Image (cartoon, helix red, strand yellow):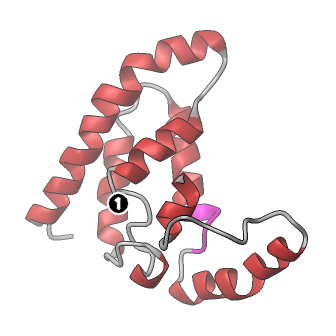
Amino acid sequence: MQETPEHTELRRTVANIVDNDINPFVDEWEAAEIMPLHDICKKLGQAGVLGISKPAEFGGMDLDYSFEIAFAEEMGHIKAQGPSTAIGVQTNMATPALPASITDLVDLLVPELQRRGRFRTEYDSHTLRGHFFN
């Protein structure tokens, strides 16, 4: 993998969130037996570091997988395994990794979930990231 200035900037952004918004609170969260995953995801989404390798047409960044690796390496600096594992599952396991799979998700699964009342039908945003965090 060739590290580029764009990889370095992504790493800097993620490291800043880990250092300022996650690590200072890990001991408190563990003592309370909680993990505010929604807040963590919102912070990462606001920083624009979710959907790294997902297609731009669905609100992703459409970058190659080396950027996902850089993201995961920085998330590995979290003082507890729970947050980085949960984010990794959401970004790379629970969501399809292949572009054709995300199309199937959007075209086949989402309408069925909407029909069952399990997924929103109206949004204030026009991107996948915005739909999740608004």
Give the main secondary structure, helix, strand or loop, of the magenta stretch. loop
Q: Residues within 10 Å of mark 1 (few under 14, many from 20)?
A: some
Q: Where residue 19 sits in the image (x, y, percent)?
A: 29, 28
Nearer to us in this view, 114 or 69:
114
Nearer to us in this view, 66 or 49:
49
Element at badge 1? helix
Q: Residue at x 75, y 86 (%)?
A: 108
Above or below, comparing residue 44 to residue 48 in the picture: above
Nearer to us in this view, 58 or 14:
58
Q: Residue at x 52, y 52 (%)?
A: 88
Quadrant containing the C terminus in the rendered view? bottom right
Above or below, comparing residue 75 to residue 109 in the picture: above
Q: Is residue 4 left or right of residue 62?
A: left
Q: Where residue 89 sits in the image (x, y, percent)?
A: 59, 54
Residue range highlighted in magenta: 92-96
Q: Residue at x 78, y 81 (%)?
A: 111
The total of numbered circles placed on residues is: 1
Q: Is residue 95 left or right of residue 19?
A: right
Q: Is residue 53 left or right of residue 118?
A: left
- Which residue type does callout 1 highlight? Ile
Q: Is residue 106 left or right of residue 130?
A: right
User: Which residue matches tag 1?
Assistant: 69
Residue 2 picture quarter: bottom left
